[in-house]
Amino acid sequence: MSELTPRKDLLDIESLSLDEIEYVLENAVPFKQLFQRSVKKVPTLRGKTVLNLFYEPSTRTSSSFEVAANRMSADVTNFTISASSVVKGESLLDTIETLQAMRSDYIVIRHQAAGVPGIVAQHTRASVLNAGDGYHAHPTQALLDAMTFREVYPDFKGRKVVIVGDVLHSRVARSTSTLFHKLGIEVAVLGPGSLIPEGRHDFMQRFRSWDEVFEWKPDAVYLLRVQMERQEGQFFPSIAEYHKMYGMHSERVQRMRELGCYLMHPGPVNRGVEITDEAMGYEKSLISTQVENGIAVRMAVLHWLKPETQHD
Amino acid sequence: MARLFKNGKIARAGSAELVAVDVLVDDEGIIESIGPDMAAPADVEVTDCEGCLLVPGMFDLHVHGREPGDEHKETLASCAAAALHGGVTGLVLMPDTSPPVDSGNLVKSLQDLVSEIGSIPMLPAGCLTKGRKGQRLAGFLGMANRGVSMLTDSGSSVPCPDLLRRCMEYARDFDLLVTTFCDTATLTKAGALNEGKVSYRLGLPGIPAMSQEIAIDRNIRVAQHTGARLHLQQISTANGVKSVFCAKEAGTRVTCEVSPHHLLLTENDVIDYNTHFKLAPPLRLESDREALVAGLIDGTIDVIASNHSPHTEFEKSADFGSAPFGVTGLETTVLAIYDGLIKPGIFGWDLLIERYSKRPREIIGLEPVVIEEGAKAEFFVFDPAAETEMKREYFKTKSPVTPFLGKTLSGAIRETVVAGL
């Protein structure tokens, strides 16, 4: 592989070149093979520090980054700040000042406001890894999704994926669809009109029913998590109606089975809402693989990014 | 001391022709004579204006002066300095201060502050509703007696159509101009920029165009029903222009304004979460921008108003969703319009003077500013061949926050000349 221009931060998918995407995805493979060994650690980041800064609760993503950093032999500090405990008056710039003083080499950040990782990246020499900002981006999720899809479809170009659910409020939908599109995978969406924004990417055609979806013959169905606390009554009438219209249940699983179609979900799953218990047991579900690949991809990203702290 | 401005060309409303003449201003600031090749009398300071234009002072109908209450953002003194620096020689102060200007006494105290500064006219507007809360009428009589320039809840829309109706019915009898910021709060919600491709890509909550359009239509209807004089602030979409056009056709007493930013920029300029592009109403589409320019030219849009909204750089350094709306405009409007629209030949100086000097004064009942013998000097010297770097040091405002920061604009304002200053 040709030499890449060193990159400090991973903030979104849009700014990545195909070479960079290939580099990360290919490097994730040997990291994943490591997980089969008794010693799962490499010394790559020995002496380096990773700060896991989560302004939104997220056990999964935060642990996945922690495990990835540990397996790279970095020292990890976890920092969870609940939104309510953020002292009023402490501005973002003040927070960044504090972070800078901690001298971390990598800052993994999740924030409820879109664009915050970018602001942090501008003001620090550490590498910033966006672990999800508002509805904007979740690039490592997209990379792990691509890795997972390519494992089952080495001939991934021209394959089809339908993303189902709340596209409007989903950073996962934004990042994953952008990455899949860059890789030449066709992306469509299914969901209620109130949750499928008009301003979405031109390349995403929209379906109105599962019948239309199955007629299209997707290679994978990607279910999004329904944010129940936010949406009921505002964007669709009830969970029951949502489940009826867009949920995954045994009848629809049967149609997927006939098509040989895989099932993906970024987690955590709302059983009984976007997917039923029986559907969770579908033999072509990739949900656990996604979790496992998340660690490998995040190791590959840590390995790839070059903090500017090294020249101190 | 008397001054002679030699070899300049006078720009005016109503004619695209630029007339080359000398202008002699006496020591009291009155334009004594205008004519070709005047010899400088003794004791006269001569300013060579070769290649430059003499342009009548502009008037901005939409300025947030921030005093009292937010003096860290702007004071009336810094506001006046910024205005003069940008060729603006008069303006209307929005009443959204703390406390809001909602009574005759507050109008009076603001007028006193303005005369203490002794700079350009800065005319207070008063609130439509008490405390700008949108719940009950403010004291119109006291404000009217103090000569308030207009009534507006500036920055927030009167939410209840019934209350807006009562405001207009009541204001009509005083022949007070009712000015409304057009927004439907239940549609705008926590939106940060235009709802569309860019808001989707940036993952930020959007403000749909219909949020403003519904408010424009509603306010026009109420004006038609009540017969009050209505001025609509900051039109931002093609549909909004259409609504105003139809209302005017129907004989409605309505005027409207557009900001220089909406004439020059679109949502595509909102890149990398730069909060210097976070405006209310938000920047819209290229097709909207084109309709706004066309509306300005054909007269559907009466005036340019900058919506000068100072917030400190620190306040604007928050993330895009949390940062306050608004940027400054007093020092950039003339230059930006010259750079983006006059220089490329979209329209001439006569239109800018009509829309940013003559018509805004007319709307609030002031005489136009002209460069004529016997008139008070109130003009600026503009050098079209020069360039202006929009760096922090350029600005007189306390909050140099503008989409043009860091850019270089064609043209330069050499000085603003006002009788008595």
Image: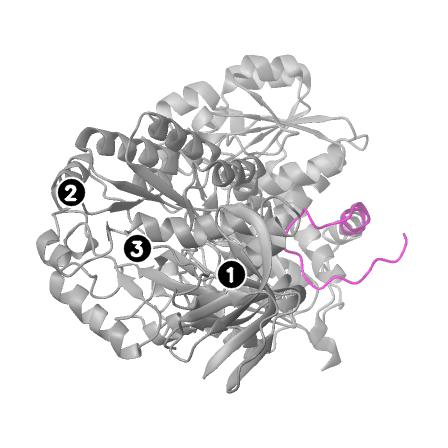
Question: What residue range appears in magenta?
Answer: A1-24
CA gap, disc 3 to disc 2? 24 Å
Amino acid carrying mark 2 in the image:
Cys
Of the numbered discs 3 and 2, the one sitting upstream in the chain is 2
Secondary structure that dominates the magenta span: loop
Which residue is more in the foreground, A2 or B337? B337
Q: Tell me, yes or no, whether the two marked residues, 1 and 3, touch with CB atoms within 8 Å.
A: no
Using the rendered image of the protein, determine whether residue B254 is visible from the camera's viewpoint. Answer: yes
Find residue A201 and report its horizontal and vertical position in percent: 62, 34
Q: Is residue B398 depicted above or below B241 in this figure?
A: below
Number of the label disc, if any, that sits on residue B55: 1
Which residue is more in the foreground, B370 or B98? B370
Find residue B242 and report its horizontal and vertical position in percent: 43, 29
Q: Under tag 1, what secondary structure? A: strand
CA gap, disc 1 to disc 3? 18 Å
Using the rendered image of the protein, determine whether residue A136 is visible from the camera's viewpoint. Answer: no
The quadrant holding residue A8 is bottom right
Amino acid carrying mark 3 in the image:
Leu
Give the letter of the chain under mark 3: B
Circle 2 residue: B167
Find residue A83 and report its horizontal and vertical position in percent: 38, 59
Q: Left or right: where does residue A138 sit relative to residue B231?
A: right
